[in-house]
Image (tube, grey):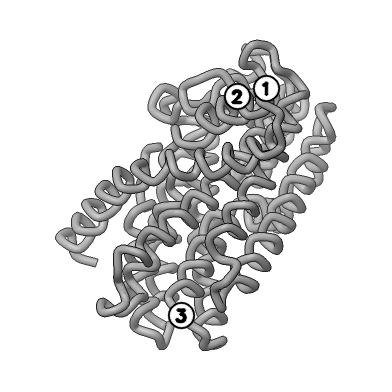
Amino acid sequence: MTQSITQSVQVMIEEESREMMTTWPDIVRDIIDAIKDLNIPDVVKWIEKVLQYNVPGGKKTRGLTLIYAYKIVIRNDQITEDNIRLVRILAWCVELMQAYVLIIDDIMDHSLVRRGKPCWYRYNNIGAAAINDGILIENATFYIIQKYFKKKDYYINILETFHDIIFKTLMGQCLDMLSTNFGKKPDLDLFTMDRYKSIIEYKTAYYTCILPVTVAMYLAGIKDPEMFKQATPVLLEIGRFYQIQDDYLSCFGNPEVRGKDDTDIQEGKCTWFIVVALQRATPEQRKILEECYGVSDPEKVKRVRQLFTDLNLLDAYSTFEEETYNLINVHIQQISCGLLHNLFLGLLEQIYRRTS
């Protein structure tokens, strides 16, 4: 993909990010109006606070992916103001789901900061009550989908896609937590590349790539099963690539740029770096990992990070990133549908060598 095309994609995404925000007040109002009918004003005030704190402040990567995908696969004569508004509404549904996942994830990971602010469960010491807020956001997502899409012929497809991918994402979260041994010292023998790929596929790839693109294709009226079949493996590759980048940024990125703290080492997460480190470590280095990985002591976290450096994992990651980017490009070219070529190349370019 040429630099000019990459820049045009970025311009479109920046414009759509602003346009999405003009739709956000309508989403909040729809959810609030539904609750007002129940005559529970305290809940109305609380839900509005939950929504405003947790949903609109992120990069909106997944919602914008949906809009971008729709604009690529739809015919120009089908792009109307009403259609674009519906696409933006559904993009917010993806972002609502993302907020639900993050609220629960932050509680499980004992994270401190999200999007430059205290994680929701830490806001005014909300604590475990934040779990209910996350579930409320999840159900608000389906309320919005029903309100705007119930009479559309693709309604069931959208509904089933959201349910299916939420289910898969929760299974990924489960496998992630099982790997950390629920806060106890992790069993490093479990940290294989196969297990890691399963975690990131289900925890990240499905809802980061499969969900927004599949829904966009349904909205655009695409019904050819072969197109969905060809799209799935490449989207999973891009989604796994995205999560491996997150592992790098969590360990070696700038927390201020990312807007969140890194707890992967402290929590004993199964990440690309620990898996590769275990493959390369000498017996003495493995003892260091067994002693220090999954421990919150700052000195032990520092020893793990230093060991990653000693094992040249930064160079290994750079090589891996370049090779993966080239491999995905090859797989994209092998797809027979030209529409999907342009879509996937644009998505890949947007995340290649990202810094946040």
At x 52%, y 46%, the residue is 95
**Label 1 Cα crowd, 10 Å radius (few <14 / some 14-19 / many 20+):** few
Quarter of the image with the C terminus is: top left
The amino acid at mark 3 is Gly
How many residues crowd mark 3 within 10 Å: few (<14), some (14–19), many (20+)? some
Answer yes or no: do the residues labelled 1 and 3 have beta carbons within 8 Å?
no
Residue ID for mark 3:
221
What residue would you read off at disc 1? Answer: 42
Quarter of the image for the N terminus: give it. Answer: bottom left
Question: How far from the left and from the top, in percent, is residue 274?
Answer: 64, 39
Choose top left, top right, bottom left or bottom right for residue 69.
Answer: bottom left
Marked residue nearer the N-terminal end (3 or 2):
2
Query: Is 104 on the left or on the right of 55, as rendered?
Result: right
Q: Is residue 284 visible?
A: no
Q: How many marks?
A: 3
Query: Label 3's element?
Result: loop
Q: Residue furthest left?
A: 4
Q: Does residue 283 sit above or below 222 in this rendering?
A: above
At x 36% / y 64%, what residue is drawn?
82
Determine the residue positioned at 55% across, 56% down.
Answer: 240
**Element class at badge 2:** helix
Q: Amino acid at mark 2?
A: Lys
Indicate whether 298 appears above or below 145: above
Q: Position of residue 90 (x, y in %)?
A: 49, 57
Tell me the residue that label 2 is attached to. Answer: 45
Q: Nearest the camera: 315 or 71?
A: 71
Residue 71 at what x, y percent from top left? Answer: 33, 68
Residue 86 shows up from this direction: yes
Q: Are marks 1 and 2 in contact (CB under 8 Å)?
A: yes
| Left or right placement of residue 123 versus residue 294 in this view | left
